[in-house]
Image (cartoon, helix red, strand yellow):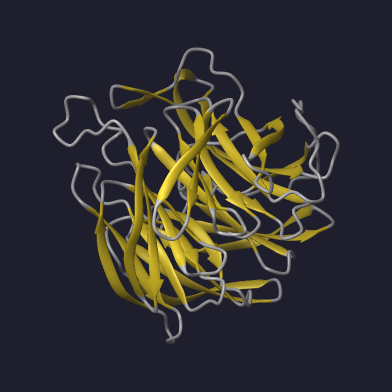
Amino acid sequence: MKRHHWLPAKFAFALAALPLLTVTASAQIAVSANDNKAVLVNGANVVPDNPAADTVTIIDMNVKPPKVIGEVKAPTSVVGPPQSVAISRDESFALVTGAIKVDPADPKKTTADNRVSVIDLKAKPPAVIATVEAGAAPSGLSINPAGTMALVANRNDGTVSIFTIANKTLTAAGKVDFGNPKSGPSHVAFMPDGKTALVTRDGDHRISVLSVDGNKVEDTKKYMVAGVRPYSISISPKGTVAVLSNQGGGQGDTDLLSVIDLKVNPPRIVDTIAVEQIPEGVTMSPDGNYVAAIMQNGSNKPSSHPNYHKGSVLSVFRINGTKLTLAAKAEFGGWGQGVVWSKDGKTLLAQSMADKSIDVFSFDGKALKKTGNIKVNGGAAGIRTALD
């Protein structure tokens, strides 16, 4: 949430790994970023005394129930959308952003960080193999379909950092600057052809369109306006539609999900639907027929707030063209964050920051059923799979 600029990183280091098992070739991997610097105390986000190191949990979704197969220590943050993790298509490595760190001058406050960790998922045990520097408060990020580039949204300096990728090595390749340090770039998502990317900007309520040509990334100056504070965004596997969350003003009002028609040029918002308070993560199913969304639903409010609810809401919407229809809904833990799908579309993982856990849900097209719970070492703040 402060300003910084990127510097090329010339070094790599490994943080202590706390393995449970090793990553296997048959696994469908989900990676959860867990923040230990933030706890919710009657609706207030506070820094605990002597917080433990942040962690990253590696989960095998190819087994039932899904199970933890590894853990490493790496900087993460609940600040920013829960798409603060990106995984390569071959599941060989993951990238995790750390938007916020404890302020060295005041341990009860936080300040902007700029680190992006590179985690080797094939190492035995998995390990952080490098740390690179992006802009101020790096938040949502994505790897292009070819696995040759990563884009990182820097919320506190109005930029998107560009990194080229080769052999799990990230090399800084410049920035896209929106010309407004308060524009709040939150998440960036690639189209399936890798030639276009969309950036949500929660500071000035825009969704920008970037062009990608080789290693050259430019702001096309085309943008859309959906609701207040566009945040998470997910693009369908066929690149025909995108769904994004609008976080609103945080006052307990009903908030919005918006639908983008990607078949037209330039893309445009074609539908917006009301949902519960503060939608966080949105994620398309692997077949593109559904989108899952998590709403905090007032679970982050003081218990005395008139719109307080104990639990967050996980909703699954059926996608018909550019229309969303509610298919199923379930309540789960407090201060909800990210959500991911199994590759068969039958299992979802939903993060609870307050409970330091991930709830496991089954989905049959009509109903969500809670089938398990995974405890993690920190507040579950961000999650992705290679399919997202």
Camera-side residue: 56 or 249? 56
Q: Quadrant of residue 221?
A: bottom left
Q: Is residue 255 above or below residue 223?
A: above
Residue 178: tell me if it is visible: no
User: x, y (%) of residue 354?
Assistant: 42, 28
Q: Who's the residue at 75% across and 45% down the image?
A: 9
Camera-side residue: 364 or 107? 364
User: x, y (%) of residue 257?
Assistant: 32, 61
Q: Is residue 95 left or right of residue 310?
A: right
Camera-side residue: 161 or 291? 291
Q: Who's the residue at 54% across and 26% down the image?
A: 378
Q: Is residue 306 left or right of residue 109?
A: left
Q: Is residue 135 above or below residue 189?
A: above
Q: Quadrant of residue 196?
A: bottom right
User: Which quarter of the rendered picture does the C terminus lie within?
Assistant: bottom right
Residue 41: tell me if it is visible: yes
Q: Is residue 19 left or right of residue 326?
A: right
